Amino acid sequence: MDKNQATGLILFAAVILIYSLFFASGPELPPIEVTPEQTETQIAPITQETPFEALPDSLVDAQRFAKYGSLAMLTIGEEEDVILENDLVVINISTKGAQIKEVILKEYKSYNMEPLALLDEQSSTMNFSLETSKGPFNLSDFFFSPSLTEEVVDGVRTQILTFTASTESGQLIQKFTLSDLSYIVKKSLQIDRYPGVFSGNVVNLNWEDQVKAHEKDLAESRRQTQLNYFLASESYDNLGVGNDAEEEQIAESVKWIGFSQRFFTAGIIADSIFQNVKVAQSTPADSSIVRIMSTSLSIPFQNGKADLSFYFGPDKYKTLKRVTEGFEKNVDMGYFFVSWVNKYIVVHLFEFLEKYFDNYGIIIILIVLIIKLALSPLTYKSYIGMAKMRVIKPEIDELKEKYGDDATKMQQEQMKLFSQLGVSPISGCLPLILQMPFLFAMFFFFPNAVELRQESFLWANDLSTYDEFIKLPFTIPFYGSHVSLFTLLMTVSQIVYTHFNNQLTTATGPMKNLGYIMPVMFMFILNSYPAGLSFYYFVSNMVTFGQQALIKLSVDDSKIRAKVEESKAKNVNKKKSKFAQRLEDAMKAADNSRKK
């Protein structure tokens, strides 16, 4: 304390002393007697009307009693840290407010191989407050006494860490419950007595988390980090993944809120509902911070008690699904038309294969083989459809020579030819379209697959991020400053497959060249995507190439031609279907309209 501070404190004390001697009204009160049974933290509460003569001599204590009243003695104490842990998480809780200071996930490391702190004191603040007759008080102003007990619940060892802050007027009790092999921490807050002190029926929470960068690729982490929430009406929503700052006051009650990173989530779950919920997120310039997320909400008391739960753990779909309704939304499984592949097939395949293999490169290869085997009937039908189109290419070429200048007539005659020969132009494409959900599903699964995190294969040190085979001394626009070898292999294999496929089809002109342009485009797109994704596509291309090579060996074009001729003979006098007739009429009408 410097001289100026000391002088000010002395003058302030003198003013209070003069005021109490000459201006205080009422008779002088006798001193308070403290019985031996009373401890330092269990003195009788002092009301607002008690004059300063009855307060402790320290001016600081006088100010404390003036501010906190009967809760004043709860603000006296020394801060200590208490550890609550199981096999999965370590939670550091302070006796000052019973606040969570740090959460470490024991199974995971950051990209620089340091302990992975999902929350810490520097990056996350979590303030609980209560309304009182003297205004709002933060629980972090009060010191609690901890006690740890254990019990067995449904055959599972469960630890209960109880924090108690008490005076003769009542007590505040906070409990944290953690079961073995669980990422869920249950918390309860209970007010015992304190008549006339607490005026509200809710506990308010303000939580801000500066999400630290735990992964190598900051850009990808920011793309996959967002604030999610689930409404009491059982609908899911989020603040999106854009870089612009967003803020929203949610009109209805909320069941849970998740600060979802790329591979991990810190979430808060209501026992009943959260009210008056406000959420916000922003992207800072600081490269050590992925995103800043915050929420403020009210937790209603029920029978003098407020209950909630925290989830601190990985974004594993099946783990999240067991937490509470809709919590699995914290991991992005893709759009509705592809998410079913990930939810009901890929996730279960991964879980099954993990029991027998610990190399995720092998697991990816096996998943490709299993999916390709299941889809092989579609691959066969696709090949046969393309083979039919190939054997009738002479007839199509004749139509082009005859009606090449009249596109409408050409289309009409082609449709007539297809009908006569019993060939469908989409017979080769439809099976491929039916396989597309599996290809697109992987585009969402691999960037979010925590199972691949820090798993190496061949030259890739981490299958959850790009494999930096060559580091470039410059940056190529839309490509990056590195070369991913798995992406190059995928591109080359796709070009080879396209060349092979073009030999089986009648595609010409722009459609034929498009097959070569697309792989190059994806080379730029996927260069910074996870190596596991590029490796999956590469293996998938090679397996498809092998499947078609085997089918080609077993399929005789002369037999296909014979079947086409047989269909032609059967359909000589066949009437047009209603659909074919309507299509032909529509094409004629369009042609007549164009000529007019």
Image (cartoon, helix red, strand yellow):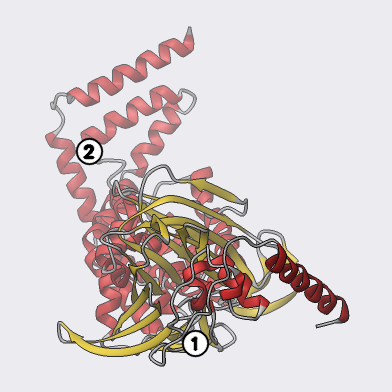
Circle 1 packing at 10 Å, graded few (<14), some (14-19), many (20+), is few
Specify the label residue 421 is tagged with: 2
* Element at label 2: helix
Is residue 163 shown to the viewer in this render?
yes
* Type of amino acid at the residue the image marks with label 1: Leu
Query: Mark 1 — residue?
Result: 458
Name the residue: 60% across, 61% down.
524
Percent x, y for residue 145? Answer: 42, 85
Of 159 and 457, nearer the camera is 159
Q: Residue furthest right?
A: 3
Of 48 and 409, nearer the camera is 48
Q: Where is residue 341, by image quadrant? A: bottom left
Above/below status of 55 relative to 160? above
Is residue 209 shown to the viewer in this render?
no
Q: Residue furthest top?
A: 596
Of 16 and 128, nearer the camera is 16
Percent x, y for residue 65? Answer: 56, 71
* Type of amino acid at the residue the image marks with label 2: Leu
Percent x, y for residue 329? Answer: 36, 59
* Element at label 1: loop
- Position of 524 compared to 259: left or right? right
Percent x, y for residue 533? Answer: 46, 70
